[in-house]
Image: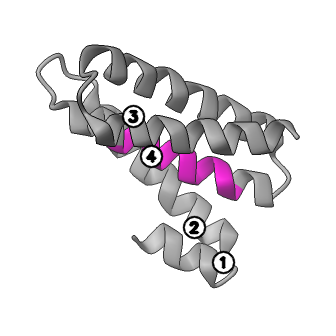
Amino acid sequence: NMGGWQESKGELDSALDKLRSAEALLANVASGDDSPPRYQRDLAAARRTLARILVQLGQNEEARDKLTTSKESLQALVREFPDDEDFAAQLQQTLDVLEGLSQ
């Protein structure tokens, strides 16, 4: 994932731009009624990664918005697919990041 690589290299602005583009693309493909649930998961994960970078850039309010949207999407997936451990794990990761932001 190029965004994550650039984050580790300290190129946060470039990573942010790439993740915003990925978020827009994923939002487009995940919006269809017949889109696979994994697209919603991927979108939620992208928003969580985007939020982590936003926090590093001091943009906590936007980060909280991204995390809240991610959480709500993942909660819906967990309700719809309660036996899917990946959806539950993704939700927990998002909750952990959101909790860290609140501290």
Q: Distance between the residues labelled 4 and 3?
A: 12 Å
Q: Distance between the residues labelled 1 and 3?
A: 31 Å
Q: Which amino acid does label 3 sit on?
A: Ala
Instruction: Assign a secondary structure to mark 4.
Output: helix
Residue at label 3?
A: 88
Q: What residue type is labelled 2?
A: Ala
Q: Which of marks 3 and 2 is in front?
A: 3
Instruction: Assign a secondary structure to mark 2.
Output: helix
Choose the circle earlier in sequence order: 1 or 4: 1
Q: Please name whichever residue, 92 or 71, is drawn nearer the observer in this view of the structure.
A: 92
The image's mark for residue 11 is 1
The residue carrying pointer 2 sits among few (fewer than 14), some (14 to 19) or many (20 or more) residues within 10 Å by Cα, namely many
Residue at label 4?
A: 45
Tell me whether circle 2 and circle 1 mark residues in contact (CB < 8 Å): yes
Q: In this view, does 67 lie to the left or right of 56?
A: left
- Residue 51 part of the magenta segment: yes
